[in-house]
Amino acid sequence: MKRAIQGRGTKHTARWRVPRLLFLLLCPLSLALAVGCAQQQIRSQAAEETDHDRYGVKTIGDVTSVANADATPLFGVGLVVGLDGTGSEAPPGDARKQLENAMQKDHIEHIRDILASKNNSIVYVTARLEPGVHNRDALTVQVMVPPECKTSSLRGGYLKLCSLYNYDSTRNLSPNANVSDRVLKGHALAVAEGPVQVGFNDSDGESKLRQGVIWDGGRAKRDNPFMLVMNSDQQYARLVSAIADRINETFQGPYRASGSEIARTQQTTSFLVLNVPPQYKYNLPRFLRVVRMIPLRETEKLRDLQENTSRTAGTSVAADTRMTYRKKLERELMDPGRTITAALRLEALGNDSIPVLKHGLESDHMLVRFSSAEALAYLDSSACGEELALLVDQQPALRAFSLTALASLNEAVSKVELRKLFGSKSAEARYGAFRALRALDDRDDDDVRGELLNNSFWLHRVAPSTAPLVHVSTTRRAEIVVFGKEPKLAPPFSLLSGEFTVNAGRDDTRCSLFAMHRGADRRQCSLTVEDIVRNLAEMGASYSEVVDILRQADQCQGMTCALAQDALPQATDVFDLVKEGQRDSKSAGAEEIRKAKADFGATPTLFEKTANRRSRTTLERDEEALLRESKRDDGKSARNTKLTLSAGE
């Protein structure tokens, strides 16, 4: 979530300093270092009609702006160990001094010998502390070999525990133009450790092996909450306190433990701290929009129009404005052209809106049922479970939102419906349901717990009675998920990745595995994907090598089922969602939904991808999967020669 949202209905906006990217020379040669500042910029979104303008209800969004909505770049220097002779001695310079100082503080002996070993390598370590992160939350970590270091590959390496710091510049911290622009080291905001995965970046050649990633390899050392900044003409202690009370009452009710508040006031009238409730952890854009829609006062009646407005507009307008806020939203909820924002506003009123939203589940229109069900999930009502699961399977455009809503609802119905989706025809729905179930942290479930192989990646065996499918992830987590009735490799094949080969002849019922290292390790196993993956891991294969072998098998139609990769549901443009509503409603609802696009149209946090990967729409994914399946069926009967693929072909 990179967006900061300007308060609506005011001409005055708080202005914060823009974070800049700086470069620090840690070594004689250059070291690129991304630097963020502690104060984040407030960006404004397009002007929109406020709740106060439309309903006569003043909301939190009318008097505040959201800040600290940019990620904080973190940097550290670490040591990767366990390399098979592909490392090199750490070159002299500031980076080495920083690493030596850290090792001395940890009372490590023989530091010079360790840094000279070809089985180790100094690395730069980076991560991003995203807004809304809580203490001990997992972070994705990137590692890279310094340009002047002679390490050829990080494959098979393990990053030892190191600290990651934020940095700022003297020019940012001081407006004095005469101050030299130097980079200053900040606080240790995270730590990083774990097995390095290589081969999953966009680099080519040797540089591809000199960079790596550790999914969930970092741990935040502090909360990184959002902030609600009061507009310059609204900075009053009573108002700040009232806003905090309204937020806490909406999300937690009148009874809450001291210290557990979602919104906390500070000793200032300029802002308050905003933590993320558990149910919104996987959908930060929605949380921020709901916060902005909370009324400042608990009012059931709208204020009458001014007397002259009533006389001008007629009695029908005056009568309409006397309608209770909730009643008006109930009417708009049933209008497909207005249902999305009506549901959000009802959600912002808290649990009292549940009966109204349940009524929306009875609508004949899909979009109304979806909007109602999604809001019910975040209000912790189990009434929405079946409807959301149905939409996941039948409406690809709503899949990311529906799955995230199910993941936010920690009720038995969510777990039941998500497991049913393991049998869907869509690979994206199946893996999306798996990720949503894992997000519920159901640790007693074998599907979620899985098996850690080679201390490097996870293997999950899921829904053995369903159709076979193999899914590999190259973003967010190193995991292979095997769905269905024992997916297998189909002979003949000869597959090669790194120092590992997997072979089987036409009539073979088992396959042969061979590893060049470790004294030429040889073994045989069954043709099942699960067995092959487990044996490769035992022989020392890295995650990237295992994934490469599975990709080759899929490319040469050597698998009995499809191989899916990063089948993460993505948000569909709000304009596509509105089309259905426009067919049944000719009201001005399309414009209302268009104004909500910036927040509603964002992919939920649960299914976000890394920044350097292009997101494809859900519809593109489903079409591609169907095409691949048809090609697979056509090719099975035509395979009459031995198929051979080597790495990189």
Image (tube, rainbow, N blue to C red):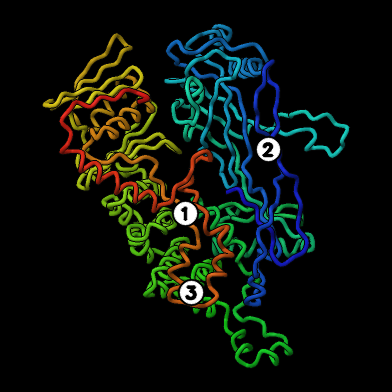
The residue lying at 53 percent from left, 68 percent from top is 341
Question: Alpha-carbon distance for marks 3 and 1?
Answer: 21 Å
The residue lying at 41 percent from left, 53 percent from top is 407
Q: Amino acid at mark 1?
A: Ala
Q: Residues within 10 Å of mark 1 (few under 14, many from 20)?
A: many
- Relative to the observer, which residue lies in front, 206 or 286? 206
Q: Amino acid at mark 2?
A: Gly
The residue under label 3 is 333
- Relative to the observer, which residue lies in front, 105 or 507? 507
The residue under label 1 is 571
Q: Is residue 18 above or below residue 474?
A: below
Question: Alpha-carbon distance for marks 2 and 3?
Answer: 42 Å
User: The residue tagged with tag 2: helix, strand or loop?
Assistant: loop
x, y percent for residue 219: 53, 35
x, y percent for residue 71: 61, 42
User: How many numbered discs?
Assistant: 3
Determine the image quadrant of residue 648. Answer: top left
Instruction: Please tell me whether mark 1 or mark 2 is closer to you in this view.
Output: 1
Of the image marks 2 and 3, the number of the one nearer the N terminus? 2
The residue under label 2 is 36
Q: Are marks 2 and 3 in contact (CB under 8 Å)?
A: no
